[in-house]
Image: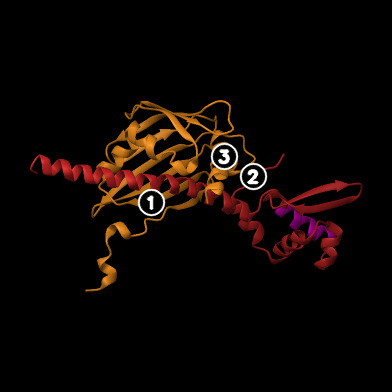
């Protein structure tokens, strides 16, 4: 038997990939070692989201997490960020919740926020995630990516970047 | 105001050898359009067109002082965009690594529950 084929699924590198698929869209992919209903549960249960959405390595605390994971329901994540006097809130609405395969939500902390679509597909006990972040315009995505942007996400990214760099 | 353009316009701007040469030159030092035209053996008009394409892609910025238009590297380069996307990838990757731990816990919990109920 080929030893390479006998690799434990848990040992397979489930690398995160990112690409800019168009002027307005970023796509993130990842495979998780678990069935789709568990992955979906981790994406829609506040107590679980609080443990992974802002992992320890970020150095920021997710202090509040309200999630009404139903189509039309709203969410609100509140973070304490070092050096920021006020907590930072991420808010939006679930445009579609189809357990356990599809989540669509808005990102309303900035005017030009994206609409994020996450699809989950199970295969042989693993789950493939494809996450699409679609912005209202090319400029909005450019601005979100650019360090000069004043968009909430970008500020957040920058702060996370600092934290990540110091953790390395 | 700096305008951020898509990767497409960057690629279009970089599809020309002269324009790539101009960027390499500007990495070394700022230069006037006249200096660039001389260096690449082109007319002023021809060089102006190339610089204009690079400018529209955000790769080069120009500033006119008196009669001289000086070119320098723009606020955005391909490397910048790649760095931004890498930062975005890292953000999600950190999250997903934490999520892996939770998924593993949920799996074990489910197996334990299954044993208890005799499934």
User: What is chain A's hue in the picture?
Assistant: orange
Question: Label 2: which residue?
Answer: B4
Q: CA distance from mark 2 to mark 3?
A: 22 Å
Question: Label 3: which residue?
Answer: A159
Question: Label 1: which residue?
Answer: A30
Check if mark 2 and mark 3 are on a common chain: no
Where's residue A1, x and y in %?
21, 74
Magenta stretch, main secondary structure class? helix
Where's residue B114, x and y in %?
13, 43
Range of residues picked out in magenta: B44-54
- Secondary element at tag 1: strand
Where's residue A22, x and y in %?
51, 49
Check if mark 1 and mark 2 are on a common chain: no
The furthest residue to the front: A167
Check the image and report above or below for A70 versus B102: above
User: What is chain B's hue in the picture?
Assistant: red
Instruction: Please tell me which residue is depicted at 39% across the width and 48% down the height of the picture.
Output: B97
């Amino acid at each position: 038997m080929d030893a390479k084929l006998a690799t434990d699924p848990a040992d397979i590198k489930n690398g995160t990939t990112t690409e800019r698929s168009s002027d307005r869209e970023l796509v993130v992919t990842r495979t998780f070692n678990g069935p789709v209903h568990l992955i979906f549960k981790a994406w829609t249960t506040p107590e679980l989201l609080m443990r992974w959405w802002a992992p320890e390595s970020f150095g920021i605390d997710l202090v509040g997490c309200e999630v009404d994971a139903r189509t039309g329901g709203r969410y609100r994540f509140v973070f304490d960020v070092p050096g920021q006097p006020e907590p930072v809130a991420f808010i939006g609405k679930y445009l579609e919740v189809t357990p356990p395969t599809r989540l669509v939500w808005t990102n309303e902390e900035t005017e030009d926020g994206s609409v994020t679509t996450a699809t989950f597909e199970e295969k042989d006990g693993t789950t493939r995630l494809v996450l699409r972040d679609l912005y209202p315009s090319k400029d909005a995505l450019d601005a979100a990516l650019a360090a000069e942007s004043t968009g909430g996400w970008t500020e957040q990214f920058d702060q996370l970047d600092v934290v990540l760099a110091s953790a390395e | 105001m700096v305008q951020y353009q898509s990767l497409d316009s960057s690629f279009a701007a970089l599809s020309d050898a002269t324009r790539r040469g101009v960027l390499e030159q500007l990495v070394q030092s700022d230069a006037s359009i006249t200096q660039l035209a001389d260096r690449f053996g082109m007319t002023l008009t021809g060089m102006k067109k190339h610089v204009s394409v690079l400018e529209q892609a955000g790769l080069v910025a120009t500033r006119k002082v008196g009669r001289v238009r000086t070119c320098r590297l723009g606020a955005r380069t391909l490397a910048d965009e790649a760095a931004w996307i890498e930062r975005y990838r890292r953000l999600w990757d950190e999250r997903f690594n934490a999520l892996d731990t939770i998924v593993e816990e949920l799996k074990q919990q489910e197996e334990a529950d299954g044993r208890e109920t005799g499934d």
